[in-house]
Amino acid sequence: MNVVSLVGRPNTGKSALFNRIAKKRVAIVFDQPGVTRDRVAREVELRDRRVMLVDTGGIAFDRRVTNDPLDCETRAQAELAVGDSAVCAIVVDARAGITPLDAEVIKRVRESGVPCVIAANKCDTADDDWRAGEFERFGLEVFPVSAEHGRGIEALGASIVSKLPPAGGEETAERPLRVAVVGRPNAGKSSYINRLLNAPRVIVSEVPGTTRDAVEVPFSIGSGPDARRYMLVDTAGMKPHTKMSKTSVDNFSLFRSEQAIAEADVVLLVLDPTLGPTLQDKRIAGKILEANRACAVLMNKWDLAQEDGVTETKAKEALRKMMPFLAFAPVVFCSNKSGYNIRRTVDAIDAAAASASMRLPTGMLNRTIELAAKKTLSPMVGGKRLKIYYALQVSTNPQTLRLFVNDPKLVTPAYLSYIEKSVRSRFGLEGAPLRIFLKARARNRRGA
């Protein structure tokens, strides 16, 4: 698919323009230089052409501009985005006029040979459009736009589309499997994605909070109609609410991480076994369960854990003790550094996705529950016993069952857990949450 990248110096409004074109709040917008670091991508439609729109971090050649220790890495990601692009839109601040940094960015993008235009942002009214004329000295098409108010977006889009290669082969493929990679800061989420892709697609650093936005990264295995397509979503490390101010970038990052979980088909929970499952890991796992998402657990940095004498048995026991509610999730022990079991993580993703979408034959489901009920009777509650008449699979993603019974009030949590285990034992459902609802069967009226 054709890539259209938004580039420019810090704080020109690239992320706001990205959200405006995408017609959705995808990238974090915050009045602070250097907020965007990684490439944030989203498939969008521009005048009936499907393109991959990419937001990039502000390009700064002097760290004092943003005071960000990761300026070099951010600039490298922006340069990679330019190299991958079919067209670049260089976003400038029309109110500020031409700055030396604008001139340097424009010079470097033009040297890349990628077709480009200038989006003169912050022209909020027609009275501001004259400000864009100053940038015409660079010999490029200049479009006065306002990301905040949506002015000039159509004209900008038309120009970008006119510079794209002829249409063909860019039809939207079957929707990829969305995989959100979540965990605490420095658990190794970004390193995992880079290792899986064998490319520096997202910034990796020992600085906690390196990843700020939810970064979508396309990934595929194979080619043609049989290819398996994924959209990996790298998320910011999820910190406890108590460690964030209400107006901080961290707060926006947490929201985007939670949103990534809600929108995912499968969630990979990345843990650091050298620290063991922590209370924050448990909170994040709780978010996954609340969203009813399919899940797999990655015990990352396993090479370091083994050096500390940690075994798989001990690690699993600690995990199940801290997070018994996530017992359905498969656990993969892996290492980003050595590549150990990285391929198995993809198998775990596929298995969890398949379990979440599995159709359970009604007859087989009812026989399974009937046998379980005969094997272990439900406990007496107030002198009565729960009777299960039949079951239906109501939905998939998440797996949801409805049991028609004599009285839902007669069920106990332990017995409901027993029924769930019986269903899982018969159908597998590894990695998929299972919701079970009880409903009283209506009594037949006489003559009915």
Image (tube, rainbow, N blue to C red):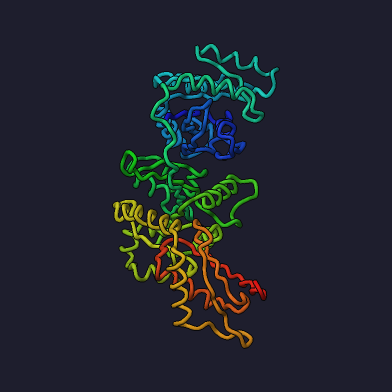
Residue 279 in view in this figure: no
Residue ID at (36%, 45%):
228
Quarter of the view holding residue 372? bottom left
Q: Quadrant of the N terminus?
A: top left
Measured from the top left, where is residue 159 in percent x and y? 52, 19
Q: Nearer the viewer, residue 248 or 232?
A: 232
> Looking at the figure, which quarter contains the C terminus?
bottom right
Q: Is residue 369 above or below residue 95?
A: below
| Furthest-bottom residue in this view | 383
Q: Position of residue 183 (x, y in %)?
A: 47, 55
In this picture, residue 171 sits left or right of residue 143: left
Q: Is residue 228 left or right of residue 115?
A: left
Residue 16, percent from left and from top: 59, 33
Q: How many marks?
A: 0
**Residue at the image point whose x is 59% and y is 46% from the top:** 252
x then y, percent, for residue 37: 49, 38
Residue at the far front: name it: 447
Q: For residue 344, which quarter of the picture?
A: bottom left
Residue in front for this viewpoint, 168 or 235: 168
At 45% from the left and 47% from the top, the residue drawn is: 178
Is residue 177 something that shows in the picture?
yes
The answer to which image quadrant residue 429 occupies is: bottom left
Q: Nearer the viewer, residue 166 or 179?
A: 166
